[in-house]
Image: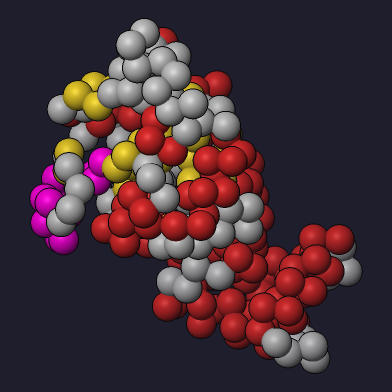
Amino acid sequence: MIVTPVRAVVLDIEGTTGSASHVYDVLFPYARERLAGWFAAHRGEPAWTELMEELRIHTGDPQLDEGGAVAVLTAWSDQDVKAPPLKRIQGLIWAEGYARSTLTGHIYDDVPAALARWRRSGIDRYVYSSGSVAAQRDWFAHSDHGDLSALLNGYFDLSGAGGKRDPESYRAITRAIGVPAPETVFFSDVGEELDAAAAAGWRTVAVRRPGDPRGPKVAGHPTVSALDDIRLHRPTRREEGAWT
Ligand SMILES: CSCCC(=O)C(=O)COP(=O)(O)O
Ligand SMILES: [Mg+2]
């Protein structure tokens, strides 16, 4: 599949650049088991205070204490609620795991080469995930393909851009990266995210990795099973300025 004109790609993580089962079976349990320990170890520190404040606002409970915080975060983890305070503490706990080399970010084999190819072609490369920006940076910096940070231009999360099923989030990213929406391509495994990006005027490519229980196609979006299956090109001279 060839897509042109393209000046920027924005990539989802879970299910697109990395394995969903790694996120669900390794990362989420790793953080869940360490929630109470993290609060005890960091009590009174700025990160602890900021997280408690964010949780009290998010839950609407100004009296929420540490025990209540652990309980609500555990429940959100069990239900995979994409709540920014959960994403923040998961990132903080995973950072300790990456630092100890007990965690690595799972990256599909085709991803480093695709990022390098797009960089050579002059196409900017961003990540947009529900995971916090800190967690995204760590995932790519401590990947099982080594440190891939240099292949990426930037990161967006729920706190910075908004929810992934809301077209307004993609408009916010368009403003931040300064690339016209029709020249930006979003890669994701989730139809509702792709629908939101398309509603904001972006191009979309669905990614369904082999063996994905949801099947090989995403309705309404061209679907590939690997990033090798797609060739992206910057605008031709004739297309230059078409959107300005
Ligand atoms: C390394 S980021 C962890 C991914 C995560 O926390 C998550 O909820 C998955 O979200 P995505 O938007 O990448 O599907
Ligand atoms: Mg995903």
Tell whether 99 sits left or right of 47. left
Looking at the image, residue 101 lies above or below residue 9 = below
Q: Main secondary structure of the magenta part?
A: loop
Looking at the image, residue 61 lies above or below residue 32 = below
Looking at the image, residue 211 lies above or below residue 48 = above
Looking at the image, residue 27 lies above or below residue 133 = below
The answer to whether any part of residue 94 appears in the image is no
Tell whether 65 sits left or right of 75. right
Which is more toward the observer, 142 or 114? Answer: 114
Numbered-mark total: 0
Residue drawn at the location 44% of the way across and 38% of the way down: 181
The answer to whether any part of residue 58 appears in the image is yes
Residue drawn at the location 67% of the way across and 78% of the way down: 58
Quadrant of the rendered image containing residue 218: bottom left
Which is more toward the observer, 218 or 114? Answer: 218
Residue drawn at the location 11% of the way across and 50% of the way down: 216
Q: How is the image coloured?
A: secondary structure
Quadrant of the rendered image containing residue 101: top right
Give the residues drawn in magenta, as a range: 205-218
Image location (x, y in percent) of residue 192: 31, 61
Tell whether 8 sits left or right of 236. right
Quadrant of the rendered image containing residue 107: top left
Image location (x, y in percent) of residue 64: 75, 88
Could you tell me which quadrant the N terminus lies in?
A: top left
Residue drawn at the location 30% of the way across and 36% of the way down: 108
Image location (x, y in percent) of residue 82: 49, 68
Image location (x, y in percent) of residue 225: 17, 39
Which is more toward the observer, 183 or 187? Answer: 183
In the image, residue 103 lies in the stretch drawn in magenta? no
